[in-house]
Image (spheres, rainbow, N blue to C red):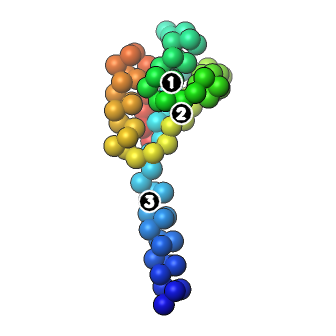
């Protein structure tokens, strides 16, 4: 019986991982580094170091996954980022 219980737990864990979404910020030529850093700290609740790192990745690679989680949690963050004029998407 313990083998069956372990298998069921493993399956549930894999299903939960599949439901996670990624919040992506895309590069633009309109906003300053400080503006993006501030948005990441206030909206996505990243600390200063994470926000700075993400901003440099966005600048150099064109986009960065800034947060992972449920769609219910990330959707309001995306909306707020877009309302501030940033390009954001959920994947």
Q: Residues within 10 Å of mark 2 (few under 14, many from 20)?
A: many
Q: Which residue is mark 2?
A: 66
Q: Circles 2 and 1: CB distance less than 8 Å?
A: yes
Q: Earlier in the sequence, mark 2 or mark 3?
A: 3
Q: Give me the C-alpha separation between circle 2 and circle 1.
A: 8 Å
| Position of residue 67 in the picture relative to residue 58 (left or right) | left
The residue beneath circle 3 is 16
Task: Examine the rendered structure and indicate whether residue 45 appears above or below residue 70.
Answer: above
Number of callouts in the render? 3
Label 1 or label 3, whichever comes before in sequence order: 3
* Residue located beneath label 1 in the image: 40
Residue 80 rendering spot, x and y as whole percentages: 36, 24
Q: Is residue 18 above or below residue 2?
A: above
The answer to which of 91 and 83 lies nearer the viewer is: 83
Distance in Å between CA atoms under marks 1 and 3: 25 Å
Q: Residues within 10 Å of mark 3 (few under 14, many from 20)?
A: few
Circles 2 and 3 in contact, beta carbons < 8 Å: no
Residue 12's x, y, as percent? 44, 68
């Amino acid at each position: 019986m313990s083998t069956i219980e372990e298998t069921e737990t493993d399956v549930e864990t894999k299903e939960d991982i599949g439901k996670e979404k990624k919040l992506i910020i895309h590069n633009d030529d309109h906003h300053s580094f400080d503006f993006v850093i501030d948005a990441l700290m206030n909206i996505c609740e990243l600390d200063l170091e994470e926000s700075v790192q993400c901003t440099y990745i966005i600048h150099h690679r064109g986009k960065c996954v800034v947060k992972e989680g449920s769609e219910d949690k990330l959707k309001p963050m995306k909306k707020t980022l877009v309302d501030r004029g940033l390009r954001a998407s959920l994947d």
